[in-house]
Image: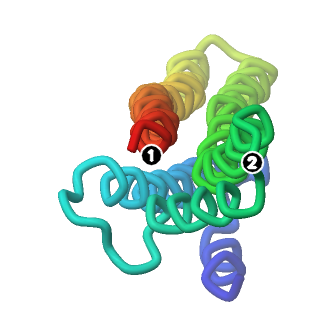
């Protein structure tokens, strides 16, 4: 906040609209970096569960097998075991998938932050267009309009470049999560076949 106030004090010639348009870069960077952290955390969970050869202490697969043993010890009928095991799997998948789905939902804000910069850039162009009163000022005003146009397109481009790779990562993580769920469902069949 202090840096923002210092920037505004030192740059009196910069309009609020220009400042807001440039601030959209900060919003994009903050949002994208938080999504990256969430997705890395989810990927580490999924990777640990999918690619570990030995069950590790307190892994979700260990918890799942312990619950399956408890369910089988407390229930005699296959249908009861299957139903309760499906509930356990749903809980475990929900534990991993909730942050991914939240990130996917929240990621839709990234293009909106870019559009904020676009609107501000277009407003800057419109303000400069309104300043044309003589033919001699036309080139100066057109130069200022170009600055607004660049801001408009750059913020949209940055937002889309942040959104598209993150969205692809979410899609890959959801495929991996489906693999993990299938593995857990196979564990039940293998456990029952013993």
The residue closer to the viewer here, 58 or 77, is 77
Q: Position of residue 62 (x, y in %)?
A: 45, 66
Query: Mark 1 or 2, which is nearer the eye?
Result: 2
Most extreme residue toward the front is 76
Q: Position of residue 19 (x, y in %)?
A: 68, 54
Image position of 134 (left or right of 168): right
Q: Position of residue 106 (x, y in %)?
A: 71, 42
Most extreme residue toward the bottom is 2
Q: Position of residue 103 (x, y in %)?
A: 63, 45
- Residue found at x 71% / y 44%: 81
User: Which quarter of the figure is the N terminus placed in?
Assistant: bottom right
Q: Secondary structure at mark 1?
A: helix
Q: Is residue 72 above or below residue 104?
A: below
Q: Is residue 23 visible?
A: no
Image position of 94 (left or right of 58): right
Q: Quadrant of residue 23?
A: bottom right
* Picture disc at residue 76: 2
Q: Is residue 138 visible?
A: yes
Check disc 1: other Cα within 10 Å, few if <14, some if 14-19, many if 20+. few
Q: CA distance from mark 1 to mark 2?
A: 14 Å
The residue closer to the viewer here, 23 or 190, is 190
User: Residue beneath label 1, please?
Assistant: 191
- Residue found at x 76% / y 62%: 74
* Picture disc at residue 99: none
- Residue found at x 68% / y 45%: 85
- Residue found at x 77% / y 53%: 75
């Amino acid at each position: 906040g202090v840096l923002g106030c210092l920037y505004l004090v030192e740059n009196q010639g910069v309009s609020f609209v220009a400042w807001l348009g440039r601030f959209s870069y900060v919003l994009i960077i903050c949002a994208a970096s938080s999504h990256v952290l969430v997705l890395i955390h989810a990927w580490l969970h999924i990777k640990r569960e999918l690619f570990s050869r030995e069950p590790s202490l307190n892994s979700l697969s260990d918890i799942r097998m312990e619950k399956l043993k408890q369910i089988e010890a407390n229930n005699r009928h296959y249908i009861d075991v299957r139903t309760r095991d499906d509930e356990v799997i749903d809980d475990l998948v929900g534990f991993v998938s909730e942050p991914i789905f939240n990130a996917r939902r929240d990621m839709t804000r990234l293009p909106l932050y870019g559009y904020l910069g676009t609107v501000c850039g277009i407003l800057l162009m419109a303000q400069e267009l309104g300043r044309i009163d003589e033919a001699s000022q036309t080139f100066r005003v057109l130069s200022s309009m170009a600055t607004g146009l660049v801001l408009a397109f750059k913020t949209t481009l940055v937002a889309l470049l942040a959104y598209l790779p993150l969205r692809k990562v979410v899609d890959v993580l959801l495929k991996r999560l489906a693999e993990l769920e299938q593995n857990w469902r196979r564990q039940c069949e293998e456990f029952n076949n013993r």
